[in-house]
């Protein structure tokens, strides 16, 4: 093997996305988030959800983020991918649904249903989420919600590790949003 090929292989291994970041402790952030939620089982209002952890590497640090996954069976055929975000540049003034792919009629219908459900709307407006994605595939909705809390920042230089907790208020909004999503999507 030539020197260049060997060097290329070593660089690939060093910066490979499949490799866990240095200092990553699988499951530790999830355990802290479970403690913040204070639930014996991951079920709220009949909405059974799961938690998954993912990492994002940066130069001398990495982030450990958690996502709430909710699967809702539905009689709705077709497929679609949607992103939900807050409206307004400075102050939150509503909920917007951006369609990424799929049946064009589902986007406006989904937005109308999210806005019409008062409990869900009241939970989503103050909720501090980074990403909220809703996908429809094989007659099942999949909600992926990544909250700003329930994550960890790990820096190697200077060395520090900081967990960002989910506050009690955010916990209540989060659980209400998951229950509301199940309620709305099961009837869509």
Image (tube, rainbow, N blue to C red):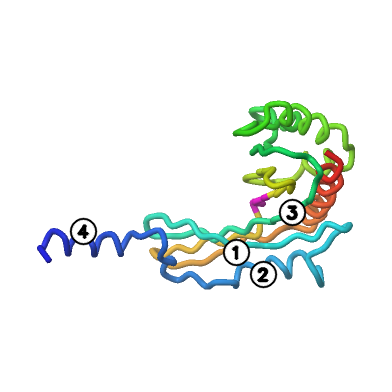
In the rendered structure, the answer to whether residue 125 lies left or right of residue 162 reads: right
The residues bearing labels 1 and 3 have C-alpha atoms spaced at a distance of: 27 Å
In the rendered structure, the answer to whether residue 16 lies left or right of residue 32 reads: left
Residue for point 89% across, 42% down = 119
Mark 3 highlights which residue? Answer: 71
Report which quarter residue 52 is drawn in.
Answer: bottom right
Mark 3 or 4: in front is: 3
Mark 4 highlights which residue? Answer: 8
Label 2 CA crowd tier, 10 Å (few <14, some 14–19, many 20+): some
Mark 3 or 2: in front is: 3
The residues bearing labels 3 and 2 have C-alpha atoms spaced at a distance of: 23 Å
**Quick one: label 2 or label 1, which is nearer the N terminus?**
2
Label 1 CA crowd tier, 10 Å (few <14, some 14–19, many 20+): some
Q: Is residue 81 above or below residue 15?
A: above
Label 4 CA crowd tier, 10 Å (few <14, some 14–19, many 20+): few
Mark 1 highlights which residue? Answer: 163
The residues bearing labels 3 and 4 have C-alpha atoms spaced at a distance of: 42 Å
The residues bearing labels 2 and 1 have C-alpha atoms spaced at a distance of: 8 Å
């Amino acid at each position: 093997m030539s020197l260049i090929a060997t060097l290329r292989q070593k660089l690939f291994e060093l910066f490979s996305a499949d490799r866990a970041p240095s200092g990553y402790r699988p499951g530790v952030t999830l355990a802290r988030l479970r403690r913040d939620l204070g639930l014996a089982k991951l079920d709220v209002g009949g909405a059974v959800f799961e938690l998954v952890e993912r990492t994002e590497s940066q130069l001398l640090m990495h982030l450990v983020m958690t996502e709430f996954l909710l699967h809702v069976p539905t009689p709705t055929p077709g497929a679609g991918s949607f992103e939900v975000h807050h409206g307004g540049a400075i102050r939150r003034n509503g909920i917007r649904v951006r369609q990424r792919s799929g049946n064009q009629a589902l986007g406006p219908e989904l937005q109308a249903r999210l806005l019409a459900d008062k409990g869900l709307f009241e939970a989503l407006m103050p909720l501090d989420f980074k990403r909220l994605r809703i996908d429809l595939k094989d007659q099942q909705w999949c909600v992926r919600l990544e909250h700003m809390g329930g994550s960890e920042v790990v820096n190697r230089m200077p060395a520090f590790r900081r967990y960002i907790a989910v506050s009690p208020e955010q916990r209540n909004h989060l659980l209400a949003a998951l229950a509301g999503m199940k309620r709305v999507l099961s009837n869509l």
